[in-house]
Amino acid sequence: MTKAKKLFIKTYGCQMNVYDSSRMEDVLKPLGYETTDGPDDANMVILNTCHIREKASEKVYSELGRLKKIKKKRSENDEMIIAVAGCVAQAEGEEISRRAPYVDMVFGPQTYHNLPEMLAKAHRAGDETGRGILMTDFPAEDKFDHLPDPVKPEGYTAFLSIQEGCDKFCTYCVVPYTRGAEYSRPAAQVMKEARQLIAQGALEITLLGQNVNAYHGDDGHGGEWTLGRLIRELADLDGLERIRYTTSYPAEVDDDLISAHADVPQLMPYLHLPVQAGSNRVLAAMNRNHTREQYLEIIAKLKAARPDLALSSDFIVGFPGENERDFEDTLDIIRQVGFIQAFSFVYSARPGTPAAAMDLQVDKVVANERLQILQKLLMDIQTQFNEDCVGREFPILLERVGRKPGQLVGRSPYMQPVHVEAPLDFVGQIHDLKIISARPNSLGAQIIHKVRNSA
Ligand code: SAH
Ligand code: SF4
Ligand code: F3S
């Protein structure tokens, strides 16, 4: 038995990074690494980073500064390996070791299955500070072929990456450069991982991909499964109660996927379908490949398939060339669709992307003012939606105990956190609950005496 070593992973960015971090734990577990809650007692610290906006990537360097101080205090036989993973690692590579020479490893999102090899190299390099190991290869295929089975009990909800990378090249976005080309995992590999997650207790699986509806997984017989097909096959697995998928690219939502929303009851009536902006001029400049009218048409079809469907979105304000009129169009599409949840950001110019070189960059003050207006509108809609839930009954997946005694916390089909006074053994079950109160970010519920049969 090797002595247990401590691993701390700090995760930034999107759900794909959350998934990757938990897979890194799986890769390192056989090498004796157990997770710990902070860097102070860690023998290995991995920052799994995000490059999407300037602020996100700059955070990494301030965190590295803090880690440097901890590492300095370590004795010879209490090693601390510092690694930078994820999208900043991919985008900045050696630049990281130049700015922070005490960093031992830099590796991209498609290479972490090589961690054992990188660690062996690090140990061969002795205890110099900054071992200079760099791995930033593509593609994703290799990673998925070499990852071990997931070992971490994932709780009742689990993420499953089915697709990596993006070929869409929206003009503001770094993801095609940091994650590489689109790649879909073979259908059998995805189904196997889903079965393992269900066996570990997952009642809900969220399928992940930078562009998840571009999924076209090899079926092993010369054909391919679409996302719609995959969802239907997953729905047939015993024990899987809820299916979600994120993030989708509107221009690639096809009729097969729309009909899955009508046919598959396990597919939750809630969809994150980022529109970014409501003006056709801005959408074209962003290279989103659809107009405002086409987006609204997709929503109409989805709602015809699943009338209780609600939507969430991401928005970018202050894209180069965005004028007041364009911004009004964005507010207008928000009112029309009634997004019940959203992430919104001021445009951040990313080096190397086409939009960074566009004329008419919007003044930061103006962009921030627009963001405030947009966020107020989104919050009003979200609050109203939550209030309209009062009096309705929803199946709630009870995930954990709450802060107050006797209280449990769960999620509605619309991802709203729900608090309820309920017996402890309800944790890990889905119960129909009556919503009795609403706040901007959560709901309160009450048990109705009718237990849902989970078979
Ligand atoms: N694949 C997803 C988005 C992934 S990035 C999609 O196509 O919708 C997550 C979000 O970050 C994007 O939806 C966008 O709103 C935001 N984002 C991406 N690049 C940005 C930039 N340069 N400045 C500000 N926000 C950005
Ligand atoms: Fe980025 Fe566009 Fe790809 Fe989404 S679809 S990851 S925004 S390039
Ligand atoms: Fe960030 Fe990379 Fe995800 S840039 S949003 S962590 S794909």
Image: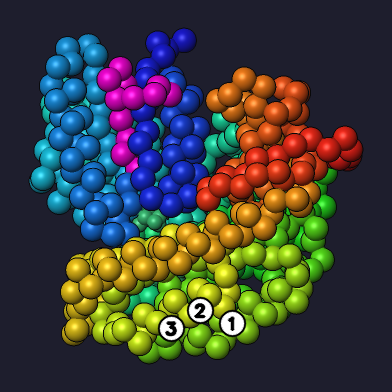
The x and y percentages for residue 314 are 45, 65
- Badges 1 and 2: C-beta atoms under 8 Å apart? yes
Quadrant in which the C terminus appears = top right
Quick one: label 1 or label 2, which is nearer the N terminus? 1
The x and y percentages for residue 168 are 43, 75
The x and y percentages for residue 159 are 58, 46
The x and y percentages for residue 128 are 13, 26
Query: Is residue 448 in view?
Result: yes
Residue 8 to residue 174: above or below: above
Residue at the location (52% across, 41% down)? Answer: 147
40 within the magenta span: yes
**Mark 1 Cα shell of 10 Å, populated few (<14), some (14-19), many (≥20):** some
Label 2 C-beta lies within 8 Å of the nearest ligand 1 atom: no
Q: Can you tell which quarter of the image residue 293 is in? A: bottom right
- The residue tagged with tag 2: helix, strand or loop? helix
- The residue tagged with tag 1: helix, strand or loop? helix
- Viewer-closest of 323 and 384: 384
Which mark, residue 296?
Answer: 1
Q: Can you tell which quarter of the image residue 304 is in? A: bottom right
- Badges 2 and 3: C-beta atoms under 8 Å apart? yes
Circle 3 is placed at which residue position? 329
Please provide the residue range marked out in magenta.
Answer: 35-48
19 within the magenta span: no
**Mark 3 Cα shell of 10 Å, populated few (<14), some (14-19), many (≥20):** some
Residue 5 to residue 158: above or below: above
Circle 2 is placed at which residue position? 333
- The residue tagged with tag 3: helix, strand or loop? helix
> What amino acid type should be assigned to the residue bearing mark 3?
Asp
Which callout, 1 or 2, points to the residue nearer the camera? 2
